[in-house]
Amino acid sequence: MSNKLSKYLAVFFILFLFLPVVFAEKETKYIKRAKVLNSPTNYPAGMTWDGKNLWLLDRKDGLLLKLDDKGEVIETIKTPGYRPSGLTWDGEQLWISDLESNLIYRLNPKNKTITRTIESPVSNPYGLAWDGKLLWLLNASKNSSMLSSIDPDDGTTIISFKAPFSSGTGLTWDGKYLWASDRVKNELYMICPKSGNVINVLHAPGPFTYGLAWDGKNLWNVDYETDKIYGLNVEKTGNFYLWGEKKEKVILTTVINNQGNGTVKSFDLYYAVPRNLDTQKILKEIKWNVQPEEYLTDKWGQKVAHFQFKNIKPAGERKIEMAVELKTNAIRYIIFPDKVTGEIPADIKAKYLVDDLKFDLKNPYIQDLAKKIVGDEKNPYWKARKLFNYLIANMYYDLSGGWNTAPTVLKRGSGSCSEYSFSYIALCRAVGIPARYVGTLVIRGDDASWDDVYHRWTQIYLPGYGWVNVDGNRGDKDWPGEQALAFGGYSNSFLMTTEGGGGSQYLKFNYNYDYSYSADGRVNVRVNQMAEWEPIE
């Protein structure tokens, strides 16, 4: 083998080894980074900010490391315990939680003395934060992970609620909200300290997220695998970010059979035509095996392909296929409730606050229930969130057939995805929040799959953010982090075909498609439909 060839092979081998790392790093760049520092330890844990400097725990050697703005160690202090986990600053001194002793220590960094010791009321105090008055603990436990605020004098628990997920590692306070990290989900959560609601769910910048700190402007997150400390400027990231791009081809097929003795004189079929959105791009012109008679637009602005078939005899069959090649992404909104301000455009209110058959807004039950849930809340985000919380707490999924009106569904306490949507739309509109629904074709698990059930969810209009996805059906989960994923985001497993605010002159209350027919004699019309998905290489 020549030396030249050996060099080429060596270079190729090195690139082959490092390409996955490069790609993995690229995949984490969803949140705007202000700065990235090298961790001075390979065993980083809790973090905090003392007003001038970052402090970092060395989990293995039990050290407190004070860092300068370049990440260099300018002071080292031995921790009181042998398994330090959480770290926070109360404006004067440091607090350190220890997993082995299950104690929380207050330490004066000036003279390196312990000024207070309290017992932790939780068994695994990984995260630690200070809100100006109380200490907060993140207890990591498989089945009962909790967030708790405690009295710093004696450890008495003041308030406690479920953590976003079960594998929490870091915790910090930004002056208004708590932020927590979870190493298994590898996500960061912005949490309301009053209710425990997770408001935002963000991808962590590295593969093994750990300690968190807030410097008044940036959220700092240390990663245990990359040994990097990431400064994240969350508020400058934008209203949302996209991730998980995939390319797919989906064919929606409808087969019409006349199994009776009579003749189907006229059969009208309407297909909702998908369009480009933030999360989906149509890569090629949509292909039809039969060209539509015409394209129409309904009162909601939805484009519809109209097919018409005449005189379908007994045993006759017709087949229509819509083939769409698309690029699809998952989306997560970054919503700050205080920024949900401003006027709702008049045209949005005129279209998406009106009543319709499935909503029954004038029903006293809807009016009274919506007002009771919202109370005296004025902020549109929190109005919508309270209604969402009520829905997931008082409904369960049941595909029993039929689409009942919102009052019936809410009284019953169960429903399909469509009934979840009708109910949430009714509650939102009753308190002045514009709401509509979207209809979709769904990738069911594998990228090569089929769908004959489909899915529908709602969108609400929030001033300053626009239309935001809310899926009460998908949000009906146990962990607050899972619930939050359904408020402002959805996955890359959908083709949105339909956007509607209620009954349509072509699709009625259906989505994806609808049909009608007239007949001469006894007919038995069978309409079968299925969406087939396959990935595009």
Image: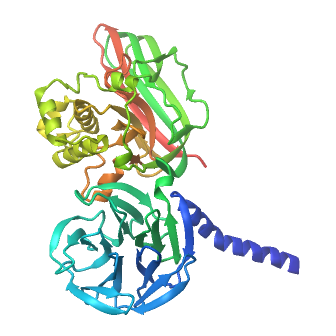
Q: Residue at x 51, y 40 (%)?
A: 278
Front residue of 528/470: it is: 470
Q: Quadrant of the N terminus?
A: bottom right
The percent position of residue 226, horizontal first and vertical second, equals 53, 75
Residue 162 is left or right of residue 226, and the answer is left
Residue 368 visible? The answer is yes
The percent position of residue 294, horizontal first and vertical second, equals 51, 14
Furthest toward the top, the residue is 520
Front residue of 23/115: it is: 115
Residue 512 visible? The answer is no
Above or below, 301 relative to 267: below
The percent position of residue 517, horizontal first and vertical second, equals 35, 13
Front residue of 255/29: it is: 29
Q: Residue at x 31, y 47 (%)?
A: 474
Number of numbered discs present? Answer: 0
Above or below, 248 relative to 178: above
